[in-house]
Image (tube, rainbow, N blue to C red):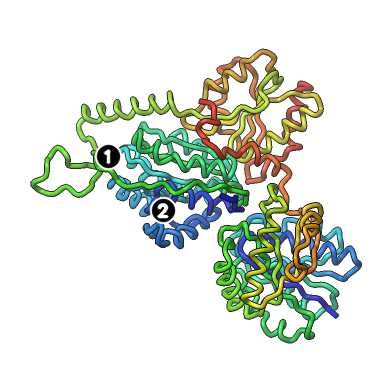
Amino acid sequence: MAKTLMKGSEAIAEAAIRAGARYFFGYPITPQTEIPEYMSARMFDPDVNGCFLQAESEVAAINMIYGAAGTGARAITSSSSPGISLKQEGISYCAGAMLPCVILNVMRGGPGLGNIQASQGDYFQAVKGGGNGDYHLLTYAPSSVQEAVDIMMFAYDKAEQYRIPVLFIADGIIAQMMEPVEMPEMVDFKIDPEKKPWACTGWKPGDDPEKRGVINSIYIDTESLSEHNAVLQAMYAEVTKNEQMWENYNCEGAEYIITAFGTVARIAKSAIDQLKAEGINVGLVRPITVWPFPYKAVADAVNADGVKAVLDVELNEGQMIEDVKIAVNGAKPIDFFGHCGSQMPTTDEIVAKIKSMKEGK
Amino acid sequence: MKNVKVLIGNYGSGKSELALNFAMQAAARGDRTELIDLDMVNTYFRLTERGKMVEQKEIRLVSPNYACSGIETLSLPAEVASAFVLEWDTVVFDVGGDDVGATALGRYHQDFVDLEPGSLEVLNVVNIRRPLSGTVEKLIRLQEGMQAHSRLQITGMINNANLATETSVEELRDGYKMLKEVSDRTGIPVAYTTGKKDLLEQFLAEGHDPKYIGKPIPIDVYMHRDWDSYIKYGLHTVDPQKNFKH
């Protein structure tokens, strides 16, 4: 199939539909409003025949996800940073009830209303909690439109395999820029009650009581809540073992290692190529899953012979750097470069920062 | 005579890029040039972000009222009137995408009607690699919608087929074929074919019917991000999971 030039928002929305999503619930907010806009038309095409609903609020939308996912359907909601903050209660409930679903956060500047330009300021919110309780979300941080599409095509499979909500954190640039995209074929998804015995698919009196699906996150007595949390923790351990994804770039023989995710990692690659041309060898480790964080991959790259120090670059005031510190565990010095206020770091800035590290400043 | 080019078209068809190119080329010829950013829809990747570059070329830039890139509520600036009342050689309107974006033109209906006959070009910028411009039917439907919303008759189409950094001559060729059919069915001519110089030359050497090429215009890429080339490292088109390290 020929490639098309697609805006990130459109491509992500189309990919979700092709991955089987038939329920979209959301509320508009820049810079991701093109996702509901696209869904509002596409869900009603004959080859999709799904449901688009603009909820009265983000809180309502995430609870609609809870309901739709509870039936075993593939449901999706999208929002941007302040809207994702509003959804946190519902996200925690989805995690507690072990509901597979997909949540998109197109990150904009914060805190508070912040601005509408690109940001990576919701890293903490995504991987260190957000809502209440001991839970994690399988969290992907794509760095191109195509990568977001490709990850979407298996996101529901992962969500259903582990019964874990999947979160995408994409900085505003990913949703707003246009790139050539190859769109995968539509998957044929149907709810299979055999594969989802937990789903509420229409039990009626007289049916086998054992087959009654219950979607729930409340466990009032201490023992049953402990048991439930043990199930969750065992699942998180499996996800951590199996699902870490990252990309290494130019790490062989590197003098410095850059850690960066999303769009910033692409800018870092430009800087790395520029530095290489000047005789300075710098590598990049780009986490693609930010939870589970690829601690070992970062440690392996940093602990290699010849690596002097680490530079973490983010479009925020330094959030992922805390996970990088855990990974490096004091073995090498770690420096930071970043911007808040949604100003993209530039290639030249990263080059200058590495040079200043080399000069021992 | 004043030449007024109004660029409308599908969201993401390349209107801002072409508007900049038309204005820069006019200014290079010595034209008194005004460039009007009438995009009331999109808040990222806006023409106005190239404001400094444009001003260095002595092009007057009129932007929507906003404090900086990315303010959500845009409004039509009063200075748009200058396009009609001041002496210019070339005025280029960069309009928002689709029929929604074209609606902003309705406000200036009488001003357009009052222009000297022959001075107005209403150009539909078409990139057939955009999903909503991928078939003849979709193109015609969009074209009709934009005409209704803008209250203007489209005078010509622009074949601006491209895949951004991955564009090859195949894009222009496919664009040519599709616009030929649209043109035959609607009677709207192909006014221009645009592309990077080398690709455009390759395409022209293939000997297609000039009637469906219009005037070929080589363009430069201004709306570019300096890390754009890194797209290749982000692409995982085969089996993404195999390409990633676990």
- Mark 2 against mark 1, which lies toward the viewer? 1
Instruction: Give the crowd class for mark 1: few <14, some 14-19, many >=20 residues within 10 Å.
Output: some
Q: Quadrant of the C terminus of chain A?
A: top right
Q: Which mark is residue A58?
A: 2
Outermost residue to the left: A206
Image position of B202 (left or right of B42): right
Q: Is residue A160 above or below residue B71?
A: above
| Residue A334 found in image quarter | top right
Task: Decide which of tag 2 and tag 1 comes sooner along the chain.
Answer: 2
Closest to the observer, B117 or B136: B136
Residue B75 visible in the shown view: yes
Q: Chain of mark 2?
A: A
Q: Secondary structure at mark 1?
A: loop
Query: Whole-percent x and y of residue A83?
Result: 46, 51
Q: Residue at x 68, y 34 (%)?
A: A268
Query: Which residue appears at 50% of the width and 25% of the height?
Result: B246
Q: Quadrant of residue B112?
A: bottom right
A314 left or right of B215 in image = left
Chain letter of disc 1 in the image:
A
Q: SS for tag 2?
A: helix
Question: What residue would you read off at disc 1?
Answer: A196
Tell me what residue is drawn at x 67 percent, y 20 percent.
A252
Q: Position of residue B18 (x, y in %)?
A: 74, 62
Category of crowding for the residue at label 2, using alpha-carbon neighbours closer than 10 angstroms: few (below 14), some (14–19), many (at least 20):
many
* Closer to us: B54 or A111: B54
Q: Residue furthest top?
A: A305
Which label is found at residue A51?
none
Indicate the quadrant where residue B62 lies.
bottom right
Indicate left or right for A244 with B122 as reference. left
Q: Amino acid at mark 1?
A: Lys
* Relative depth, front residue between B7 and A164: B7
